[in-house]
Amino acid sequence: MKLAEYFYLDFTLLWCWLCYFAQGDQIKILDTLVDQTVRKGHTVSFKCSIGFNDGKAEEENIRVRWKHNGEILDHRSDRYKLADSGQTLILREVDYQDAGLYTCVASVRGQAEREKSSARLEVRGTPDPPQEVEISSCGPKRVELIWRDGWDGGEPITEYLIQFNTSDNPFYWNSADEEIEYLDKKSKTAFITLSPWGWYSFRVMAKNSLGYSEPSLPTKTECNTPPERPTSNPVNVKTKTDKKGKLIITWDPMTRMQHNAPSFGYLVRWRKKGSTFWNKREILNPNENQFEEDVNDVYGLYDVQVQAINSHGPSFQPVFTIRGHSGEGEPLIHPRDFRVDPSIHSHPHEAHFIWESVDPRDERIMGKFRGYKLQYWKSSEGRRNKMEVSILIDLDSADFHHDVRASILDLPANTAFRAQVSVMNGHYTGPPSDTIDFKTSEGVPGPVRNLQLEEVEGYHAVLKWDPPDEPNGLLLGYNLGYQKVHGETGGEIRALEPKIYNPSHTSAKITGLQPNNHYRFFVWARTSSGQGDKKTVEVLTKGPANSQMASIHQSGINLASHDIGVNFRILMTLALSWTLANFVFH
């Protein structure tokens, strides 16, 4: 080749090299990709931010491609999504095969690739199930298991969970936490204690910092243990006392894993206190949880036993003796000297009682002493509407050398009642004490009802109401008051005089008002204990053009004939700037 030809070739390569880098300088990757670790099944994204060295390149001319382990990604997959004009890669439902090196390649369209950035993705997850779980040896009461680890999910395996089932219930897997004698994590070996009379299969689960694996496949073979006598007895043995004339013994049924042999059941024994002869009964239903026997005493004291048995004999464990009682009966004793407590001041809505305490050891209680039942009712209604209050006594802290005191609250005032008290045991209530009569004292009445305006004019208003539902005593009459309202605020509440002293007068005419003004009126019912809660009504008087000064007639009563002042009327000043106002009873 001639020298000129060599020169031409070198010049051409130099020109291409200069053009290539000149165009490449137009773009750059501002933020390089960052290595990430993500949990299997989650979503992860890589962001490749593109910048421009000068203003000549336009964003639509930028081309971004993504690679995984050197292979261009197929963006048509549902698991991959591009955002921000291709500058962000989103991976959904990440799996282990998504781990590796991800590369962002940026260039100007029509030009060679110029800018790259790469980062690694590591995928972590729970371990794969252990493999090849096998029964290495099977003894009468112990089994040896071996297995092999699966994939650890990217995190070290720290624990194993061994489960077993039996041929009686192959779909229920028991965790063998308490049965594991020995577990070697390095050799993947475990020794497990088994109950007699069972056909066992096993499976294993591995755990890392992210959780447990799915269970392994069950062992292909079963471990069969021979039958023997029960090794334990039922727990929570006790008696029930809710049936008179019955001795009821209860216990918690034992599980299938505790049967140890066929024909499993319970041997129940009982004897009355002081007797040396044991009565007994075999119960061959393993799911049974109680036994009943007729007895001729009430709340008698008994020794009871419940022992597990099967076809090989009674349990190895010694049986415990539990002391209990037969059924309770109705108490034969009643409280004495039941009366109103004179040491406590009477209140309108309360009643206070006192009586002699009973001895909780008294056999006439016919059961375990629980407390008292206080019954009371309105004298006018009779026992059909009686109410009851249970007064429970703590036997450990109560002082039975003193009288018992009890109070009833929220009673209606000024009301006659009758009351009595009885002794309670666990299930029955005894005969009542002597019945006493008492009456709550007077109290302030409840609010009046249906307060309303009968008539409103410029210079007067007529109020009407009904007596309160709860007078709480003898009504003496009503108090009235008023307040002039300015916008959202009201002035001082002032009493209107004279008071109404006849409780049958349930209306009033108030005169001396100013036209086109806002007033608020109050009505209280009154007993000897004071006035009750107020009721309120508001009124806007009419303007001068519509005002009338006329007599008012309601229910056939001439209201004007009851005026006090000019026509028997009392005048009163509402305020310094107010005109005279008065009111008339109806």
Image (tube, grey):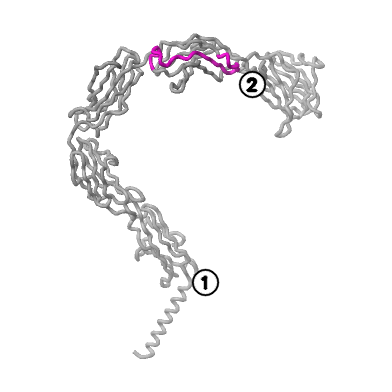
Going 52% across and 17% down the picture, which residue do you hit? 405
In this rendering, would 15 be left or right of 345? left
| Span of residues in magenta | 341-367
Instruction: Bin the neighbour count of mark 2 within 10 Å (Cα to Cα): few under 14, some 14-19, many 20 and up.
Output: many
Q: Residue 175: give x, y in percent of width and height.
A: 29, 41
Q: Residue 371: give x, y in percent of width and height.
A: 45, 18
- In front: 229, or 492? 229
Asked whether 173 falls inside the magenta stretch, the response is no
Instruction: Bin the neighbour count of mark 1 within 10 Å (Cα to Cα): few under 14, some 14-19, many 20 and up.
Output: few
Q: Residue 176: give x, y in percent of width and height.
A: 28, 41
Residue on which disc 2 sits:
447
Asked whether 347 falls inside the magenta stretch, the response is yes
| Amino acid residing under circle 1 | Asp
In this rendering, would 160 be left or right of 456? left
Q: Are marks 1 and 2 in contact (CB under 8 Å)?
A: no
- Image quadrant where residue 275 sits: top left
In this rendering, would 317 be left or right of 515? left
- In front: 316, or 199? 316
| Amino acid residing under circle 2 | Pro
Q: Say which element carries label 1.
A: loop
Does any portion of residue 65 appear in the rendered image?
no
- Quadrant of the drawing holding the N terminus: bottom left
Residue on which disc 1 sits:
54
Q: Tell me if residue 314 comes above or below residue 104 in the rendering.
A: above
Q: CA distance from mark 1 to mark 2?
A: 86 Å
Per the picture, the main secondary structure of the magenta-coloured stretch is loop
- Quadrant of the drawing holding the C terminus: top right
